[in-house]
Image: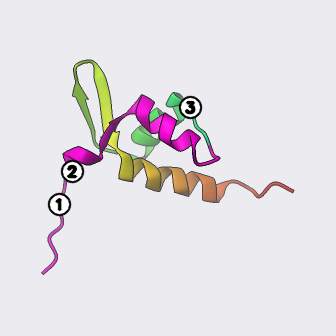
Amino acid sequence: MQVIVPYSVASDMMTLQDVRGQLAETGYPVTLDDIAGWIEADGLYTEHYRRKVYVSYSDILMAHGDRVARKPAAT
């Protein structure tokens, strides 16, 4: 039997600024506005703690991958 956890694991949660820093290393950097837009468009779960917003890095990686895959290839 497979257990599906409906919430993010605490260790997977990162601030939006940290997420932006990690994605900058992928070769497909994004802005904080991009990340916030994905959160809203995809209905991603967020946590607010001490005036910072946290989101699942796994969820953002999926959203980032979807957006990168949709971009036309550079020629």
Disc 1 residue type? Val
In the figure, residue 13 lies in which quadrant? Answer: top left
Distance Cα–Cα, label 2 vs label 3: 24 Å
Q: Residue furthest top?
A: 51
Q: Are marks 1 and 3 in contact (CB under 8 Å)?
A: no
Span shown in magenta: 1-28
| Residue 54 position within the rendered picture, expressed as x and y whole percent measured from the top left | 30, 34
Q: SS class of the residue under badge 1?
A: loop
Instruction: Name which residue lies at 20% across and 44% down.
Output: 10
Mark 3 packing: few (<14 Cα in 10 Å), some, or many (20+)? some
Among the 4 quarters of the image, the one containing residue 18: top left
What element does badge 3 sit on? loop
Look at the picture and state if 70 lies above or below 30.
below
How is colour applied across the structure in the image?
A: rainbow
Q: What distance separates the C-alpha of mark 1 from that of mark 3?
A: 29 Å
**Which residue lies under the disc numbered 3?**
31
Q: Residue at x 69, y 53 (%)?
A: 71
Residue type at mark 3? Thr
Dot placed on the residue nearer the N-terminal end, 1 or 3: 1
Identify residue for label 1. Answer: 5
